[in-house]
Image (cartoon, coloured by chain):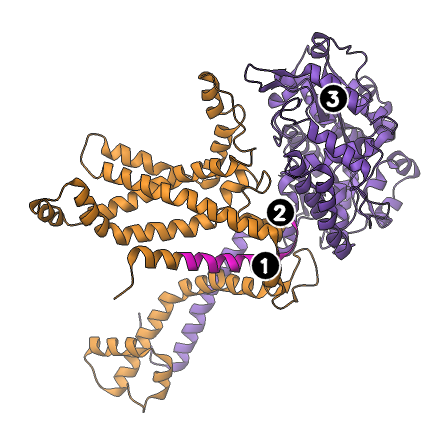
Amino acid sequence: MAVITNRRTRIGLIAASVAVAAGLVLSGCSGASTSPSKDAGGRSLTVWFPGNNETEIKLVEKKIVPAFEKKTGATVQVTYVDWGDISTKLNSAFAAGTAPDVFGHGPAAAADFVSNGRLSSLDSHLKDLSDADRKDLAAALPGGRVDGKQYLMPLSNQGSLIMYDAAAFTSAGLDPDKPPTTWPALLTAAKKLTERDSSGQITRSGLLLPSQDIGRQQTFATLLAGAGGSQLNASGSKILWDSAAGTKALSYFASLYDAKDGVSSSLGQDYSNAPVNQQPILLGTAATAMMSSTSMEQVIAAGSGRDLRVMAPLSFPGNKAAALEGAGPGLMINADSKEQALAWKFISYFIDSKVNSEYTQGIGAIPLRASAAQTSAVKNDPILQAFLKAAPNGISNPNVPSWVQVRDIVDKHLEQALHETVSPKEALQQAATEALPVLQANG
Amino acid sequence: MTAADPVVTARVPSVLSQNSRRASGNTAPGRKRRKWSRTAIAGLLFVAPAALYLIIFQLAPVLYGLVLSFTRYSPISRLGPQPVGFANYSALFTNGAFGNALLVTGRYVLQVLPLTVIIALALALLVNRPFRGVGFFRSALYVPHIVSLTAVSLVWLWIYSQNGLINDVLHTIGLPSQAWLLGPATALNAASAMRIWKALGSNMVLLLAGLQSIPGELYEAARVDGANRWQLFRYVTLPGLRPMLTYVVVMDIIFLAQGFAEIYVLTKGGPLSSTTTVNYLIYTQAFQYNQLGAASAMAFVLFALIIGFSFLSLRGIAGRQR
């Protein structure tokens, strides 16, 4: 190193070395950032989709998105994020300023983002759609509205019904052509369908309902609606789940896991998100199971020759049948995105009648557009027909701020009731006590 | 250094200056100033990248976390952190979930730590002698340590699953399968077993290094005095191993009390919050419920507890410094 005799030179050298070091560190920062690199030549868009369905990922990444890129000249960087992680990753990304331009989530998550000013309204874009388009999408749009404004554009309709194994029905002395129409009747049938080994352990569940995190709240919501109750009032400000209907629904749910005459094994096991070859109804470890249309389509495709059928929505006697069904996951536009126009172009491409039919048929989802129900592909699909028939009985989770936290509070107390650490009534009351301040603080 | 040289006094650490003066052997005032400055600049150049890294990526986030712990802050809010004083800390006293997470974390540490240290010590004693294949044995035991905890947890997720390895073995010998990760009574034990297996390799290698640093003369002298095998272990091996044992225990406490990846992969804190460690709770509070202030307060309470227990372990095993 040269001898430094001049004080100014010394100071300059120190400043330069600090600048170099800071530059190196900051270049490290930018290298580690999740922020997308914008194409120098064209425009680019980052899109996060929720889920881990291999069929959907292939369809979107290999077919639909490349076609969009070819049509527009834009570059789209698609990332699929597991359902369980999508909220946390989005929250982190918003905090860091690296949230994607467009992202997907369930309708119930939209209100939180809206209340924090993170979403662009889609109203102005919807006005540009033709009357025919708006009419065709009319049934799906309300699921993406918050305070009367459209923020989320559903890509499909989704729901869950009970799939049953007709052969198992026959061998248990039940008529597969006359499946149960109420929850109590299904429980009676399930007891006949349940098989146990010599130690008394269930080897084939008579009835499987989702009982894992989040899934058990959705199951409860379905049972609650079938018992004539609801989770919140219409404005979302009052808790209603701690009602007699709620207790009836949760008591029923808990009875499935009764140690002596239960009909379901593996409380808490997540079969809903398991790969198709691990689906209990395909493995023969369940005779009936609540499943989404997507899972059912995949099971039918994988289990060729099996007589698997779908039940109509169920209820408790004296009440209207209900099924969790409605607007499925949709896409939203980040309010901070610099590519607002391109973001809408991407969304509108996905809801184009031809593209959307390809998407919903590809993943086995219920069609988004009313006109799609009239296509021969849908008309000849018994699974989709069952779901379309059930649509008038569809119920969905409330779309209110902090719903994710409220849902998790409910979920935690439901779990306690299912494990019989508290009674169903106590669990629902405790959930209401804990959730009310959250609703009030953010409502 | 003299009082007549205020500029240099303010800029150059005295020890560094004295060292460079001794090294040069030159006492002329003008020459001294140049030498000190050159050394100081060279030192700064060498230290700056690491110091900047530490300040930007280690100290600054910790200090920012401390500031956040006195605020209410949602990562998706545009308002930024809002000061709330000690409210986040006082709320922890009545937070049942936090109390439960502390208990789960404590139980987790207590379940894993003694077993992993005792088994690792036994393995270290076993491989601290020459036999055919000792190198392979040592390497095989160390392999789990170099595999990512998340990857290992995924493998164990399958091992514990309904149709996994353990249930297959149980089925083969005519025993009913178990829902290892789905039962409140078994989930934390299952996670602990995996963590013991994971920590064994590194602990064994560290303790083996400790064993090999004990002078052989001490054993010879003890044998001459008539010590039996137990007495050799009790009065030579254990005291000789004490510094390394202290390090192993303290590091294990620090890592185990921050258990997250294995919990996230295996159980997601369930069932019935029976595996919700403090770190997992912090994660859900911060990124699921957008309460970064409350989560930061939890993190600093955990930090204080880890320091406290680590200090107690140091004093307990290493003894008071004399």
Quadrant of the drawing holding the C terminus of chain A: bottom right
Q: Quadrant location of residue A158?
A: top right
Q: What is the C-alpha distance between the residues marked 1 and 2?
A: 29 Å
From the viewer's perspective, is A90 left or right of A429? left
Identify which residue is drawn at 39% across, 77% down. A10
Inter-mark Cα distance, 3 to 2? 39 Å
**Residue A57 on the magenta segment:** no
Inspect the image, locate mark 3, and give the three-letter code of the amino acid beneath it.
Leu
> Which mark is nearer the camera, 1 or 2?
1
x and y percentages locating residue B210 in the rendered image: 24, 48
Toward the right, the furthest residue is A131
Residue extent of the magenta highlight: B288-309
Please say whether residue B293 is one of the residues in the magenta stretch: yes
Whether residue A222 is visible: no
Q: Residue A224: give its label.
A: none
Q: Residue at x 55, y 62 (%)?
A: B65
